[in-house]
Amino acid sequence: MSNHDFWVDAAALDELPAEDVKGVNLEGLELALYRVGGEVFATDDLCTHAHARLCEGFLEGYEIECPLHQGRFDVRNGKAMCAPLTEDVRSYPVKIENGRVFVALD
């Protein structure tokens, strides 16, 4: 794992519902946190296709479905999985320490 200079405390792990998504604001960035299978992932909250918040979408396994046009992203890496998406969403490194979720912003 690379050394990131800017780890930000995003949430308590127990604030994140299992197999679901939560929107957070970190240092002015709108992010979506996903808790899947005991792991936590983070991406930008805004869909790359249209102005929609991914935290309001439907999480199924490792894919978040945008609430607007049903495009899906892989929450592990932000990869756009299907039309109408053409651009990946940015993903961020996450670590969990002492029951807190930290996201690396750089």
Image: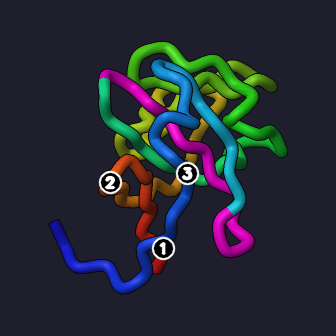
Q: Residues within 10 Å of mark 1 (few under 14, many from 20)?
A: some
Residue 58 spot, x, y in % from top left: 64, 18
User: Magenta residues: mostly which secondary structure?
Assistant: strand
Q: Which residues are magenta?
A: 26-37
Q: Residue furthest left?
A: 1
Secondary element type, mark 1: loop
Secondary element type, mark 3: strand
Q: Earlier in the sequence, mark 3 or mark 1?
A: 3
Mark 1: amino acid: Leu
| Residue 98, numbered circle | 2
Q: Which residue is mark 3?
A: 11
At a point 47% along the width and 21% down the height, the residue shown is 18
Query: Label 1 near label 2: C-beta < 8 Å?
Result: no
Mark 3: amino acid: Ala
Residue 54 spot, x, y in % from top left: 68, 36
Query: Label 2 near label 3: C-beta < 8 Å?
Result: no
The type of colouring in the image is rainbow
| Residue 61, numbered circle | none
Q: Nearer the viewer, mark 3 or mark 1?
A: 3
Mark 2: amino acid: Asn
Q: Quadrant of residue 67?
A: top right
Closer to us: 25 or 79 = 25
Query: Is residue 75 located in the magenta-colored stretch of the structure?
Result: no
| Residue 105, numbered circle | 1
Which quadrant is home to the N terminus? bottom left
